[in-house]
Image (tube, rainbow, N blue to C red):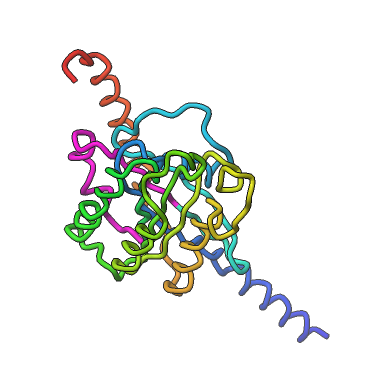
Amino acid sequence: MLHGSAAELSGSLTSSALPPPRTRIFKIIVIGDSGVGKTCLTFRFCAGRFPEKTEATIGVDFRERLVEIDGEKIKIQLWDTAGQERFRKSMVQHYYRNVHAVVFVYDVTNATSFRSLPAWIEECKQHALGTEVPRILVGNKCDLQDSVQVGTDVAQQFADAHSMPLFETSAKSPNGLGDGSYRDSDHVEAIFMTVAHKLKSQKPLVLSQPAEGSGKYIQKLRHFEINLRNFLEENKEIF
């Protein structure tokens, strides 16, 4: 009897001494031209709704959401950078650091944003983000069906040529499309969860929590963004 109690006590002490499992963190960057809806897509996934008001991203927009996949809690960090070159130069090195996946976004109603995709892919290559890093292609604003300039067949050919799955969706419509229909694979929620599932299956090792100073680093990014926005507002006649 005493022996059993000692064993139970030992087991209790052993289990209580174990540190809690660390939450895996996946950094996903969302890139594309300004105005394609990157911020709206990340906001839809993290907040579950379309933002009431949006402004052009200056610097970096950062959002995160805790999800559960196969019983494991995983934190998804979405980094959305400014599409305009003048806002990106000072941030780009930090933006491409420790990236686990890339989401390329274009506007189906803006052919120019689609033609810009090769340049975005090349920028990723310049920062050592090649085809070994999971990536997907997202055509946004499918609710504007009367204004579509980039057909699905053309986009699919491009996606196939660059070994990426293609998703067409709308951050504005709750179900991903504007005609009242529902395609689960094209739902904004499903798009980002598809990436998360892929990352979970490819990265079995437990990732460490960010370094203690990472929170301060994100705060610095946001502080920089605020200062830059104020500077541009004060000098808007120049810019």
Compared across the picture, whether 191 is left or right of 2 comes to left
- At 77% from the left and 80% from the top, the residue drawn is 5
- Name the one closer to the observer, 79 or 189: 189
In this rendering, the answer to whether 77 lies above or below 217 is below
Compared across the picture, whether 227 is left or right of 195 comes to left
In this rendering, the answer to whether 186 lies above or below 145 is below
Compared across the picture, whether 186 is left or right of 113 comes to right
In this rendering, the answer to whether 235 lies above or below 63 is above
- At 24% from the left and 20% from the top, the residue drawn is 232
Q: Is residue 92 magenta?
A: yes
Relative image position of residue 25 (x, y in whole percent): 45, 58
Compared across the picture, whether 224 is left or right of 49 comes to left
Split into 4 quadrants, where in the image is the N terminus? bottom right
- Name the one closer to the observer, 149 or 212: 149
Relative image position of residue 194 (x, y in whole percent): 50, 63
- Name the one closer to the observer, 224 or 39: 39
Relative image position of residue 121 (x, y in whole percent): 24, 57
Q: Is residue 108 magenta?
A: no
Residues in magenta, as a range: 77-100
Split into 4 quadrants, where in the image is the C terminus? top left
Quarter residue 205 falls in? bottom left
- At 20% from the left and 38% from the top, the residue drawn is 85
